[in-house]
Image: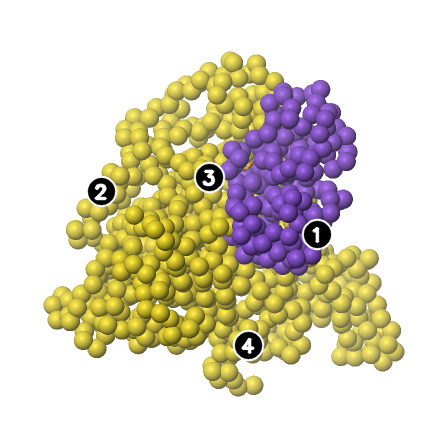
Chain colours: A purple, B yellow
Amino acid sequence: MIQFTVNDKAYSVDVAEDTPILWILREHLNLTGTKFGCGAAQCGACTVLLGNEAIRSCSTPISEANGKHITTIETTKDKEVKALQYAWVAEDVAQCGYCQPGQIMNAASLLKKNPHPNEAQIIDAMRGNICRCGTYNRIKSAIAIVAKG
Amino acid sequence: MELTRRDFLKHSSFVASAFLVSFIVPQKARAQMVDNSVPEPNAFIQITKKNEITFFLPQAEMGQGAYTVLAMCIADELDAKWEDVFFEPAPVKELFNIPGMPMMLTGGSNSVKTRHLQMRQIGASIRAMLKIAAAKYWKISADLIQTKNAILTNTKTKESLPYGFFTDVIKLMKAPEKVTLKENSELTLIGKPTKRHPKEAWAKVMGHTQFGIDVRLPHMKYAALIQPRVFGATLKSFDATVALKKPGILKVKQLANHKIAIIAEKWWQAKEAINDVVVEWNERDFAKISSKDLAKEYESYLDKECLPMRKDGNVEEAFANAHKVVKATFKFPFLAHAAMEPLNCTVHHQKDSAFMSMGGQFQTLYRNKCAEIYQLPPEKVQYYNNYLGSSFGRRGTPSADFVIDSIYAAQNEAWPVMTLWSREDDIKMGSYRPMYRNSAEMAIDKEGNILGFKAKVIGQSMTKGTIFESFMFKEGIDATHKEGLTDHQYKVGSHDIQGFCPDSPIPLLWLRSVGHTQTGPLVEGIIDQAAVAANMDPIDFRIKNLQNPRFVELLKSVAKQSNWYKREKNSGYGVAVVESFGSIVAYVAKVKVENSDYKVEKIWAAVDCGLAINPLNVENQIISAVNFSIGITKYSEITIKNGEAEQSNFYDYTVSTIADTPEIHVEIINSGEKIGGMGEPGVPPLFPAVANALFDATGKRYTSYPIRLS
Ligand code: FES
Ligand code: FES
């Protein structure tokens, strides 16, 4: 039995220990906001927070979440995620939208560590999150808005 | 009102007056509005008593903004309250077909191009019907009724009623024979920069949007596939004994298309069991195919007489008398679409019917495939189109490859089954943008006139053997070999343009902007060489030789934006202008070369799509196209060895990231010409603009993609 919380709700699952967090979220808890993009820690679509740390949930086994807290895009409380969602809409970022939950969760983790990143720091933190629609310019400006406060 | 073309050449959101006409609602749409036999009293617009308004949109939303722009057209004419409208994908029905086409389809940047008038007519019709209903109710003339924010107001008594009050009345009402669309001055949305509809935008940032991969149905199961990695290979035998003992595995079955489906309670379980199935393939000679050998074969045709694509004037004389001749050969690799959402489709095969739910560009074709395989009448297959996690053509496949997998996997099963390709399936299983080997030669005189143009395009056809063959593959030549090449816009004295389509078992498919991905860099590359040979500025040379004033207007715009004529010599500036899908896009690119690497630092864009219904979305599509195309320019390439793709995921199939993003400046010029598409036209000029900028910076011509400096 592995026990953890997701967005403040407690869960326990009885699954193979090496099942990636991504598939627990999507297929067991029906939290489909976290996306499957590559399954190989290459695209960032599956990014969630484990504690305050952004992780690639497709490549992190659920056993690592035991006793810990996971935050996903479906959170209604996380301060950084909320601020980013407003900025995302204001900046008209999302095109297909598929990569955006991962982008936002990754940006949230950046802001938790560094609330006022400059452009170079934003690029450096976000370069692992692929957006095939190429919304990068808008992602940059949306994060910059929140970073400026 | 008589306006000259010049008057239209105003920037940003000016709305051309080409719309000030009275339009007749198409017979079918009109019939539908009073046809009570459909579940929705009105096919495109549903209004509830509570005044909730839902639009049923017949085009796929894959990131390009089709929902928002089409909804703007309806909402503006309907006088709905923009923030409050809902969208639903239209079901597959004839009345939702593209006007003049026998199917529903999203491709060729067609959504707004083919539908904007229809959407406006529909909104205007319903508004007219609501006014007639209210006029009867208030016993006044309809002219005395005003509409705004989905509310009707009696201007005499100031009494107001919501649209929903009359919903039952208009269901039974005949649609008016004629509707008059709004005057430009009355438009509230069309022509104005408008963000994604807030409902769509918020759902996307909160993780609530339902993509195909998010479909969840009661009792549904998931299938992972085992596909032959060698193109053309067939299944010899397999043993699933071990896999079947694994937790969650329900079934391992052979599909009629030489693939194996592992069906499990969870997709992860199915995927994990792949290695436990022992499979033997018949690979035959297919395992000998390599892109190296194919390239050699293609290149050999460049020295031979190929099939004619355009021949006029006296080319031999032109080249014999030329002041200068420039030449180039081009190499374009196979490309995978690598759409962000892995390919998937959910199917439930019921007794006398079926249900399918996915994100697809070819709704009708996929529905019909399912009906054909299950031997059902097409109307017994219900199709639901979810949001698409990008596509770039991949979910608009005439072969319907991943859809057929899903139809077979769910065939005769008791549960709904989602079949989901892994990223490795996506990168390795093809439906690639074809590989090409092209050549070009241009002859110019002393004054910089173009006397002759020779070119060859060698690449496998992407339409041969598909339902598009009859009108896209003629006399041995694929239409996508020619687009943007044989119909280029330069004044040229003579042509000899040839092509050839060698076959191979590698499955191919259009990728965003299709043939223009190879003809754009060819034409704008050789033109740039000709400009240098003529000792002329690349923009001046183009303006001198272009016969289309719309192109000239765009070139002047990017020249001005980029301060082109004041740029430092050899500081990495390049230009290109390409028309595709009814719209013209010009870029000036500025690159920075450092060591053996380069970065695209800035893009200045000028766009003429006739009329920008949503200028902000036009800008977003340019941003999208630039970043997408930088990946193709710098990194992306599929190579084939021993019959299979050598790449398998984003670690070896590289695409652009935020670190590659240039600053992008977009100017829109509304010429007032016919409205063109915007999903694709930003792609083709990016490649040559960057290549030409690299020439400016390094003095070397780069014509082999992806472009690596060393
Ligand atoms: S799905 Fe996890 S990084 Fe791509
Ligand atoms: S918005 Fe489509 S992949 Fe990022």
Q: Chain of mark 2?
A: B
Asked if labels 4 and 2 touch by Cβ distance under 8 angstroms, the answer is no
Which residue corresponds to mark 2?
Answer: B296
Q: Secondary structure at mark 2?
A: helix
Q: Nearer the viewer, mark 2 or mark 1?
A: 1
Q: From the image, which quarter does the N terminus of chain B lie in?
A: bottom right
Label placed on residue B16: 4
Q: Chain of mark 1?
A: A
Measured along the vertical axis of the image, is residue B438 above or below residue B545?
A: above
Q: CA distance from mark 3 to mark 4?
A: 44 Å
Q: Earlier in the sequence, mark 2 or mark 3?
A: 2
Residue B472 image position (x, y, % from top left):
36, 53
Which residue corresponds to mark 3?
Answer: B650
Q: Nearer the viewer, mark 1 or mark 3?
A: 1
Disc 3 C-beta below 8 A from ligand 1 = yes
- In the image, is B608 to the left or to the right of B25? left
Residue B546 image position (x, y, % from top left):
33, 73
Instruction: Report the number of discs.
Output: 4
Q: Nearer the viewer, mark 2 or mark 3?
A: 3
Question: Which quadrant of the figure has residue B46?
Answer: bottom right
Q: Amino acid at mark 4?
A: Ala
Q: Earlier in the sequence, mark 3 or mark 4?
A: 4
Asked if labels 3 and 1 touch by Cβ distance under 8 angstroms, the answer is no
Which residue corresponds to mark 1?
Answer: A83
Question: Which quadrant of the figure has residue B195?
Answer: bottom right
